[in-house]
Amino acid sequence: MPRPLKPRTVGVVPEICHFKPRGVPAKKLKTVGITLDEFEAIRLADYEGLSHEEAAVLMNVSRPTFSRLVEKARVKVAGFLVNGTQLVIDGGNIEFDPDRACVKCKENMPEKRMERRKRSCGIITGCVEEETELTDAQV
């Protein structure tokens, strides 16, 4: 009997889960699917620029497992782009952790990444100001 799979922690669920080439009916396209944990791995590694170690901690998996997730997801996304197939983001053995995300914009970041986001996300700036108020009150 195989060992039960440990759920991977996901902080943000994508708002759009289906992608396809414009002008081609979905019925004529092959579908490539990536799971929500693979999506989260790409988001953390490529979009947020976290190291594999930092991202693995956020997803509650080992670093080698995180690296395998990123590799599988990159191959699937590359196949989607090169072959012009339909991409669907769905499924996977996940658990959603809303406590890890920003209350206003649902972004989750280690502290050192917050500085980068302050300049690029107006919503995060408001959140950082609230965090600063809490920090001042604690002092």
Image (spheres, rainbow, N blue to C red):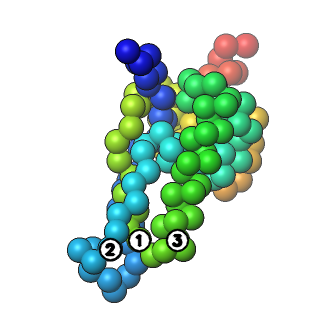
- In the image, 131 versus 82, the foreground residue is 82
- What residue is drawn where x is 56% and y is 30%? 59
| Residue 31 in picture, x, y percent from top left | 35, 63
Q: Secondary structure at mark 1?
A: loop
- As drawn, the residue found furthest toward the bottom would be 23
Q: Are marks 2 and 3 in contact (CB under 8 Å)?
A: no
Up-down relation of residue 2 to residue 78 (above or below): above
- As drawn, the residue found furthest toward the left would be 27
| Residue 44 in picture, x, y percent from top left | 62, 43
Query: Whole-Å distance between the Cαs marked 2 and 1?
Result: 6 Å
| Residue 133 in picture, x, y percent from top left | 64, 27
Neighbor class of circle 1 (other Cα within 10 Å; few <14, some 14-19, many 20+) is many
- What residue is drawn where x is 56% and y is 64%? 78
Q: Quadrant of residue 74?
A: bottom right
Q: Is residue 104 visible?
A: no
- What residue is drawn where x is 40% and y is 60%? 32
Q: Secondary structure at mark 2?
A: loop
Q: Quadrant of residue 64?
A: top right
Q: Amino acid at mark 3?
A: Leu
Q: Is residue 47 visible?
A: yes
Q: Which residue is label 3 attached to?
A: 81
Q: Which mark is residue 85?
A: 1
Residue 99 located left or right of residue 72: left
Q: Which residue is label 2 attached to?
A: 29
- In the image, 43 versus 31, the foreground residue is 31
